[in-house]
Amino acid sequence: PNEKLTRGQMMALLYRLEGEPDVEAQTPFADVKQELYYAKAIAWAYANGIAYGVSHEAFAPEAEVTREQMAAFLARYAAWKGVYKEAEGNLAQFTDSKQISAYAAPHVMWAVENGILSGYTDNTLRPLGNATRAEAANMFMNYCLNIGG
C-alpha cells in the first residue's frame, strides 16, 4: 500500500472501474507499447478526454502519478460520466494551495469538496506529491461512495 502508483496503473484502474469497454483506437503516445497491460486503458482514457499526455508524443505511463493528477483524472472521468458538478469553494485552508498547478486547481477543488481528496494533519494537500497505492484506493473508494456514476 505504500508503493507509489504510476500513471499507467491509474489509467488501468479507471478503465477497470468502467468495466473495460472495447477500445478501437490506439494511443498516439510513442512511450506506450501496445502489448502492455495499460495500453488499452490509456487509449480509452485519451479518446474520452479523461487523460492527456505529458506532451503530444509522451504519456509517461511509468511515471508516478501525483495527487493533483489523480484529482484531475477522476474529475474528468466524472465529467465523462455526466456526474461532475463544478466546485465553488476555495482551497485557502491548505497552506500549500498555491503549489497546485493551474490546470488542476478546479479538479482538486472538486475532489476536496466532494470528499474524494483530503489534506494531511499539517493542513497541506501535497498536490505535487506522488500518490501511494493506499491513497489511490482511498480516493477511488471516496469517488465510488460520494459520486458513483
Image (cartoon, rainbow, N blue to C red):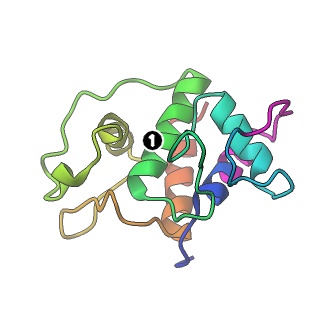
The residue that label 1 is drawn on is 72
Picture coordinates of residue 79, whole percent (x, y): 52, 25
Q: Secondary structure at mark 1?
A: helix
Q: Residue at x 56, y 51 (%)?
A: 140
Q: Residue at x 36, y 65 (%)?
A: 129
Give the quadrant of the C terminus.
top right
Picture coordinates of residue 27, whole percent (x, y): 73, 40
Q: Main secondary structure of the magenta part?
A: loop
Name, please, the residue furthest toward the bottom.
Answer: 2
Is residue 146 among the parts visible in the rendering?
Answer: no
In reply to whether residue 21 is colored magenta, the answer given is yes
Question: Is residue 85 found left or right of 12 in the rendered image?
Answer: left
Give the quadrant of the N terminus.
bottom right
Picture coordinates of residue 63, whole percent (x, y): 55, 64
In reply to whether residue 135 is colored magenta, the answer given is no
Q: Where, by quadrant of the figure, is residue 22 drawn?
A: top right
Q: Nearer the viewer, residue 91 or 11?
A: 11
Q: Is residue 80 above or below residue 65?
A: above
Is residue 121 among the parts visible in the rendering?
Answer: yes
Q: Is residue 129 above or below residue 149?
A: below
The magenta span reads 12-27
Question: Is residue 36 found left or right of 64 in the rendered image?
Answer: right
Dot 1 amino acid type: Ala
Question: Is residue 78 found left or right of 32 in the rendered image?
Answer: left
Q: Where, by quadrant of the figure, is residue 80 drawn?
A: top right
Picture coordinates of residue 33, whole percent (x, y): 78, 55
Q: Nearer the viewer, residue 83 or 106?
A: 106
Dot 1 alpha-carbon crowd within 10 angstroms: few under 14, some 14 to 19, many 20 or more: many
